[in-house]
Amino acid sequence: MTAGADFDRRMMDVALRMARRGLGATAPNPSVGAIIVDEATGEIIARGWTQPGGRPHAEKEALRRAGPAARGRTMYLTLEPCAHTGRNPTCADAMTTAGLKRVVCAIPDPNPIISGRGFEQLSDAGILVEVGVGAEDARWVTLGHILCQTEKRPFVQVKMALDAAHRVALGDGAPVWVTSPEARAYAHLLRAEADAILVGAGTVLADDPELTCRLPGLTKRSPRRVIMDSSLRTSATNKIYSAHDTVPGARYPQIWLATAVDEAHVMASPHAANRARMTLDAVPSADGRVALQPLLSRLAANGVTRLLVEGGPTMWAAFLAAGLVDEAIVAVSPQRNTGSTRAVTGSDLDAHFATHGMARVARRAIGPDTLHIFHRSNA
Ligand SMILES: NC(=O)c1ccc[n+]([C@@H]2O[C@H](COP(=O)([O-])OP(=O)(O)OC[C@H]3O[C@@H](n4cnc5c(N)ncnc54)[C@H](OP(=O)(O)O)[C@@H]3O)[C@@H](O)[C@H]2O)c1
């Protein structure tokens, strides 16, 4: 007999690894992990995770892989199963029919049409239900979905690359790489795990980036790109507007140009030619710039649960000042940049992020660089 709190926690860690696999590929649905285990032997019979596009859900995927072997077994699951009545049988229905004996789940689903009903349906069917194992980690993996439900905005991750003096190198027609290929590959992985990437007009004008994921094997995981350009300073010929859409069958436009000018101005500009490929949001704020909170709500309503803010420094500062950053990932090079640079955080990263209600959760080497990770303290 293997059962016990330690065993449950180890199995939940496996389910959490499954959930992480789907990040960036399942929106607007949450990425969930599910494994089916024989508690008598400790054997993992089947693994499931939310499939690209959000369906099948992790529970049904694990049950499909387990087949009749699921009967009498335990499922470890990172988020409460769906139980609302729709066209398709719910996951709670499928789990009941499969004859599971016990379900260990990390967190309830805050979606009001589910919230508690999934657990209730399982308990009513005689399945033993335990909630809370690995809850903190599951909340973090699922935060995009949770925030879309509770705050009508996506999970916001900010990524910065700084030199040894914590300054940002300024591009002049092309990006200046201060960090190593290892750190840049990691940045591309973050793109694959996001539902959308956001930059300001300054970065498009200075670097002319494509903002696609170019990691071997993950090029199809390039997310949608959002450009915040209040007064249409970017050019319709910037590469970002012509970079090929790399998400086959995507259900959403691949480029959003968020602008504060009205539709008539957009139609009179060269950007009108790109119109078929964009949703043009007119979201002005008091200072005439694109307002952040309404833009985030608009993105959430359009299926973005995880947003990667790639910069530049004006954008980082704006999101931090608005208290809208859940995670900051800062790659610091051991080299000083000799070209033109801008101060960003000051010498003490911890103090800088503390002023924005964020605390360090990790510091680790990545190639020759150091990765510093900060989380919103009340996330
Ligand atoms: N090292 C790195 O990790 C990294 C990453 C990205 C960029 N960079 C560098 O950063 C430099 C560009 O810096 P940047 O600060 O000018 O670029 P940015 O943050 O990408 O763009 C700033 C612009 O965004 C627009 N914007 C729209 N709505 C806004 C709002 N609510 N709040 C603030 N800005 C808003 C503003 O222009 P409008 O008012 O015209 O809309 C603003 O000037 C480049 O040289 C690039 O190479 C470095």
Image: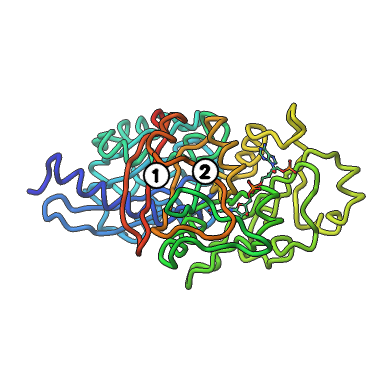
Which residue does the image show at 73% across and 65% down from the upper left? 242
The answer to the question of whether label 2 and label 1 lie on touching residues, with beta carbons closer than 8 A, is no
Residue 33: image x %, image y %? Answer: 36, 50
Up the image or down, 365 lies above or below 116; here it is below
Task: Tell me the element at label 1.
Answer: helix
Q: Is residue 324 left or right of residue 209?
A: left
Q: Which mark is residue 141?
A: 1
Quadrant housing residue 352: top left
For residue 379, say whether it is visible: no
Task: Tell me the element at label 2.
Answer: loop
| Quadrant, the C terminus | top left
Residue 138: image x %, image y %? Answer: 35, 41
Task: Between residue 208 and residue 119, name the one nearer to us.
Answer: 208
Q: Earlier in the sequence, mark 2 or mark 1?
A: 1
What kind of colouring is applied to the model shown? rainbow
Q: Is residue 269 left or right of residue 253?
A: right
Q: Cα distance, mark 2 to mark 1?
A: 28 Å
